[in-house]
Image (cartoon, grey):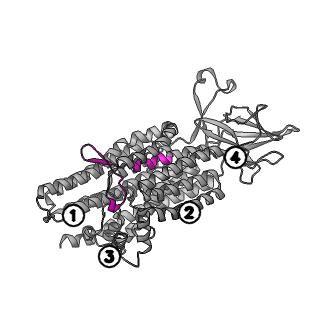
Amino acid sequence: MSFSSYAHIARYGFMAVIVIPSAVLFVRAARALLANIRRAADPVRGFFLLSSDPVDPETVAPLPLFHTTHIGASRASDIRIRGKGIRRFHLSIFYHNREWIMRPEHHSMVWLNGTQTEESAVLKHGDQIGIGRCVLHFIVDREPVDPLRSAPTDTCGHHHHTAWSGVAVLMTIALQIGAMLIVYFGMRGTDTEPAAVFFVAVLGAVFLFTHLVSAIVNIAVKPADPIVLQAAVILTTIGLLMQARLLGVSRSFPSYLEGYTMEAWHRSLKIALIGQAGAVLLALMALTAVVLLTKKTNLLETIAPVCFVLTPLCYAATIVLGRGSETHGAGLWIPLPGGITIQLTEFAKITWIVTIAWFFRIRPKGKQLVAFGAWGVLNACLIVLLPDLGSIMILFPVTLVVFTVMTSEYLLSLGILGIAGIAGVFLYQAVPYVNRRLYGWISLWDRIGDDNRQIVYGLQAVSRGGLSGRGLGNGSPGGIPLASSDMIFAIVCEELGLIVGIALIFFYMAVWLRGVSGMISARDGFTSAFILGSSTAILIEALVVIGGTTGLIPLTGVTLPFVARGGSSLLAKWLLIALLLGVLARSSTLPFRISQPDLRDEESSKSTTPVNA
C-alpha cells in the first residue's frame, strides 16, 4: 500500500482522537456552567448589609451583598429601595482590590456616617449608608461559615484527576504520536525526505515540552482550569500537525525557480517550521510565570492605564512601520532585525480587552462613557487606516458583549449597534479595501474573481473532504491562496473531514463556556469583565475565520487561533490563555483589608483576612 492509502485509513484514527476530546471538554464545560448558573444567586458570604428605618429602629433586616450590588428604585437593582429622591440606579457597592467600595451614581443623594457624599468611599465594618429614609449598615461577619458550603466543588471543573480528564490527555498523546508518524512516513521517498527526521524531532520536542508545562501548571497553580488548558494544547497540536504537513508532506521541489537549490529549499522549510514551533515554545516557557503572577497579584488592574495608552500606539506604529502585500490585505507585519516580523495588532487585542475590563468593571458614569467612546473611535479610525477589517469584526462584538453584560444598558447597546451599522455602510462606500471584500462576498455565487477566489477554492476543498476527509497529505492545498494561514480551516476539513472541523468549533466553545462559568462565579467586576472578554474574543475570532472560509461572512484575513500559521498570533493567543488561566485560578476567598481596631488584634494589624466567598 502507498502512503496515500495509509493516510486515507488513518483519517479515522485522527477523527477519533480529535472528536472524542472535543465532546468530552465541551460536555464538561457545559455541565459546569449549568451548575454555576444554579449557584449564581448565592450572595457573597462573610459580608452583608443590615437595613434599618430611623422612624422604626426596631425593624432591622439583613440584605445580601454580591461582588457588585446595585441599589436603587429600578426593578433591575439587586436591592430595590423606593421613595422620594431615590433614582433608578442610586448607589453601587462593589468589591475591588481587597476592599469594598461604595459609589453613588450621578446626582444621587447618599449619606455616609451622617455626611452627604458624592464621591466613592471605602467601606469599613459598621459604616452607615443613608439612602432616603433607609439606613444600611455594612457588616463584616468573621464567624466561621458552614464548611459544607465553603468546601471546593467540581462545579467549576477544577478536579484534575478525573477519568474524563485522563481520557482527554491520552487522546492528546495519541494525536501527537500519530502526527509525528504521519509526517515522517509522508516525507519518506519524497523531495523532503532529508528533512523528515528534523521535522519529527521538532514536533516531538514541542509536544513533550507541552505536557511538561501542563504538569507544572497543574501542580503549581491550584486550581488551574484543565478544560481551557487542554483545549489550547489540542488545538496547538492540530495546528503544528497541519503546518508540518503543508511544509513537508506531499511536496515537490520547485525546480522551475532558477538558481534555487534543494539545500536552500530544505533550509527554508526548516526555518518555517522552527518559526511556528519556536513561538509555541516561547509562549510555554512564560506560561507558568504569567499564570502565577496573574493569580497572585492585581497585575492586570495595575497595567490597565498602560493598556489604555498602548492600544492606539500599537495601531499607530503598525500604520507607520507595517509592511505587507496589498493584494492580500493590510500591511500588519513590522520587520525586525534578523528577518523576524512581529504583528502588534495581535497584542493590541489583549490590551483592548484589559482596557474594556477596566472601564466596565462597574457601571460607568457619563464622563467615563464619553472617554471610552472617544478612545474606541480613535482606535477604530486607526484600524480603518491600516486597514484591518478582521480586527473590527472581532473587537466590536467583544466590546458590545462586555458592555451589555456588565452594565445592563440594553437600549444603549441597541443604539451602538445601529450606529455601527451606519458606519459599516459608510466604510463600504468610502474604503476600497472594505468595498472589495464585501463585494467579493456578495457576488460569491455570481462570478469568480480576485475578490472571492479564496472563498470559492476553500468551499471546494471542504466539499472534496466530505464528512471524514481524504487523509493527511491527500488534499490539494497548493491551489488555495494563503492555505497555511487564512484558509487553514478549509485544509483541515478537506484532509480530516467536516466532522473534525466541527470538533474544532467545540474546542473553542468549551473555552468560551468556561469563561462564562468563571464570569458568573468571579469575585469582582474587573475579573468578570476580563474573563468574559478574553474567552469571547477567542470564540469570535474562530467563528469569524470559519465563517469567512465557508462564505457565511466576508473573508477578513484573520487567522484561526492556535491552528493557523503565524508566530505573533500564537504568542498572543497563548498569552491570552495564560492570563485567562490566572484570572480563573484566583482564590475562592475574598481577601479583605481589615483596618478597624475591633476587628483585628495587634499581631494581624497589617495583614489581610480572607473571608470565604
Kind of residue at disc 3: Arg
Mark 2 or mark 1: whose residue is earlier in sequence: 1
Kindly identify which residue carries mark 2: 422
602 left or right, relative to 135? left
Q: Amino acid at mark 4?
A: His
For residue 405, above or below residue 134: below
Q: Is residue 330 magenta?
A: yes
**Three-letter amino acid code at the position of disc 2:** Ile
Asked whether residue 162 appears in the rendered view, the answer is no
Q: Looking at this view, is 205 or 487 the one in front?
A: 487
Instruction: Compute the Cα span from label 1 to label 4.
Output: 59 Å
Residue type, numbered disc 1 = Val
Q: Earlier in the sequence, mark 3 or mark 1?
A: 1
Q: Which residue sits furthest right?
A: 55
Q: Quadrant of residue 241?
A: bottom left
Q: Which is nearer the N-term, disc 3 or disc 2?
A: 2
Q: Nearer the viewer, residue 148 or 354?
A: 354
Disc sitting over residue 70 in the figure: 4
